[in-house]
Amino acid sequence: MPGPLRAAAAALAFFCTAATAQDPLLARNLAATCANCHGTNGNARGDMKQLAGVSAEKIIAAMADYKSGAQPATIMHQIAKGYTDEQIRLVAAWFAAQPAKK
């Protein structure tokens, strides 16, 4: 990659990371998109997978499996591809910090 392009890519990565760090509600807002299937704050009902209280590592691994196609799914493989790795880390940490309701 030529020097100017490399510099531009580095600047873009820096500003994207800085923007993420500046929005304390970003993780919660991203996680809210999961509520339709996985329940409010990840407390699912019925047969849906619970996300609240699940370790971040487990959620990250599951999302990677959905993204790669290693884990079969009806819709999650498409949804997972719509998130960056950083967004997945944010959402996973947010759900891991939520108390699981029984």
Image (spheres, rainbow, N blue to C red):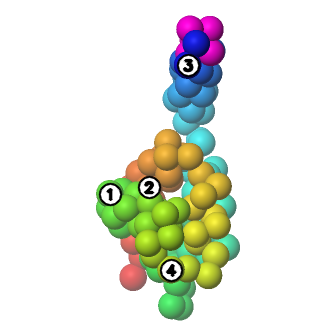
Which residue extends farthest front? 2
Residue at left 44%, top 72%? 70
Task: Check whether the beta carbons of the residues at disc 1 and disc 2 lie within 8 A of each other.
Answer: yes
- Residue 42 horizontal/vertical position (percent): 51, 69
Amino acid at dot 2: Ala
Alpha-carbon distance for marks 1 and 2? 7 Å
SS for callout 2: helix
Most foreground residue, 18 or 72: 72
Alpha-carbon distance for marks 2 and 3? 33 Å
Q: Give neighbour class at mark 1: few <14, some 14-19, many 20+ (Cα, 10 Å).
A: few
Alpha-carbon distance for marks 1 and 4? 19 Å
Amino acid at dot 3: Met
Most foreground residue, 43 or 48: 48
Amino acid at dot 4: Pro
**Which mark, by number, is residue 1?**
3
- Residue 87 horizontal/vertical position (percent): 54, 46
Closer mark to the observer between disc 3 and disc 4: 3
In which quadrant is the C terminus drawn? bottom left
Alpha-carbon distance for marks 4 and 2? 20 Å
Amino acid at dot 1: Glu
Q: Give neighbour class at mark 3: few <14, some 14-19, many 20+ (Cα, 10 Å).
A: few
Residue at left 57%, top 61%? 80
Q: Is residue 45 visible?
A: yes
User: Does the magenta segment cover residue 34?
Assistant: no
Closer mark to the observer between disc 4 and disc 2: 4
**Which mark, by number, is residue 72?**
4
Residue stretch rendered in magenta on the structure? 3-7
Alpha-carbon distance for marks 3 and 4? 36 Å
Q: Which residue is mark 2?
A: 92
Q: Which residue is mark 1?
A: 57
